[in-house]
Each structure stands twice: as C-alpha cells, then as structure tokens.
Image (tube, helix red, strand yellow):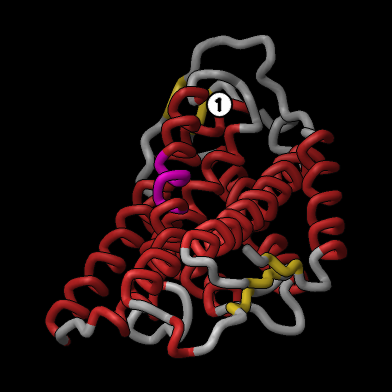
Amino acid sequence: MNNQLSRRNFWIIALNSSAAFVLSYLFIFYLNQLSYVLTAGMYDYEISIDYNGYFFHIEPYEWTHDAVIMIFSSGYILTLIFGILSLLAFFQLVADAIPFKVFFFWTSFHAATYVFGGLMLGNLLTEGIGHVFNWMYLTDTVKMIISLIGFSGLLFMAIFSARLVALSSNAYFARYNERIAPFFMTAQVFVPYLIGSALIYVYFLPDGMFHERFSWIIMGVMLILFYLRSRYSDDLMFEEDDNRTVRPMPSLVIFTVLFYLLSRGLLHKSIYFTW
C-alpha cells in the first residue's frame, strides 16, 4: 500500500488527469465554436472564429428571432448531449482498469459546468445563452426558475462526481478506502483543476468569452462541494485485473500538448466563413 501511495504515482495520476482536463475543456469549447459556424450557415450569416471567440459579420438589423434562438442555444444543446454521452461512456468503461476513462469524467464535468453554469448566470451573460434569454423577453419569475435549474444541476453534478471519481480509482488501485481517498482525490481532481485552470487561462489570453473567464470559479465552488461529499464515500473493492497499475498515458499527454499548441497557433488569426 505504501508503495502505491508514492510521490511518483501521485504525479503520474495527476499528469494523466491534467491532460484529460485540458483536452476535454478544449473539446467542449471548440464544439461550441463549431455550432456557431454550422448554425450561422443555416441563415447565411458570415462568421469568423478564432482561439477565443467568434464574430458575426452582419448588421444588427439582420438578426431575426429564430436565428438568435437557434444560433446561441445550439452549442448548449450539443454540449449537454455530449456530456450525457461522455457519462454513458464512463459507465461503459467503469469496470475496466483503463485510466483513459478520466477523460470522459472531465468531459461530463465540463459539460455540466458549461450548460448549468450558463443557465444559472444566464441573466448576467451578454453572449451565448444570454442572447437567447434577452430575445425571449422572459419574466423575472421565469428567469429565476431557470437560474434555480442551473444551480440545482451544478449542485447535483458536484455531489454525483464524488462517486464517479471513487469508481475511477479502479484504474490504478484494487480497493478504495479512507486511506487512499485523500491521495487519489488530490491527484485525480484537485491538482488537475489547479494545473488545468492555469493552462486554460494562459490559452485564452489576452481575453476570452464569459465562460472562459469565469468557469474556473464555478468549477472551484463545485469542487468544494465535491470534497465535502467525498468525505462520506463508501469503501470499494474491485475485481482482480492484471492491467491495474499506476501508469502514465503518454499518448493522451502528447496529443493534448500538440492540440493545445497547434490549435492556439493555427487559430491565432481568425478563420472566416462565408456562404
């Protein structure tokens, strides 16, 4: 047991999870960028995107009610769908000693943060889902209900995530108990959050959209709730598996580094789409 809880193993787990954290975040971001491009094409709106935003090359009077609803809600719908699919993929792999399933955990976590955080703060947003709320002329009561739905979604995901992380420990350990929990939670979740948030912040410099500027705060609050819930996790025993060992995922780490650098470099100048 002491050999398993070594400093080397700690940083292997943290490195694997940090790579998954960053890659899944960028996946969600570019999924939304893609949704803007595709839905803009439906209305023949010219658009340009880059590594930290988008811009519609149209006059204000060209916006229509249907276009605003479709364009600025499609990304949230896609993100929700992929978040659910990632959760299903995680449970499909949950019995296997595969470290890669942490990618699906972080994808579902980022998706929940993006969607429910957007709903909770939708009344304050000046972009994304905020446009939809503004054009729907919702009453204060309806806006409050939507914000409560967003808050409830974040709360549920924060509480539920503690169980997911405990289950993911079978990629490295044959059992999960109160002795392993602090070591694993820190390596799998808290250190990747700190490293990943710093890397994401640097990626979107000098400025990013609302979610990219403030999502780390929402995630931080969720992880505090996550930590409080994780203190009451049950001990778990897993089936024997010869593949279960603390090992790095070099392919994931290398792919994440390349995607991080190349996407930031290639999209430094905007890509223009016309129809």
Q: Is residue 178 above or below residue 64?
A: above
Q: Residue lying at the far bottom in this picture: please name it.
A: 60
| Residue 42 visible within the image | yes
| Residue 186 visible within the image | no
Q: Is residue 245 left or right of residue 35?
A: right
- Please report the residue visible at 78 percent of the width from the left and 33 percent of the height from the top: 249
* Residue bounds of the magenta highlight: 79-84
Which image quarter: residue 36? bottom right
Report x, y in % for residue 69.
35, 69
Report x, y in % for residue 239.
50, 12
- Please report the residue visible at 71 percent of the width from the left and 41 percent of the height from the top: 13
**Of 151 and 158, which appears nearest the observer?**
151
Report x, y in % for residue 199.
75, 65
**Of 222 and 203, which appears nearest the observer?**
203
- Please report the residue visible at 39 percent of the width from the left and 55 percent of the height from the top: 77
Question: Is residue 146 inside the magenta stretch?
Answer: no
Question: Is residue 83 inside the magenta stretch?
Answer: yes
Q: Residues within 10 Å of mark 1 (few under 14, many from 20)?
A: many
Figure quadrant of the C terminus: bottom right
Q: Is residue 192 left or right of residue 142?
A: right
Label 1, on which residue?
Answer: 170
SS state under label 1:
helix
Q: Is residue 132 above or below residue 194?
A: below
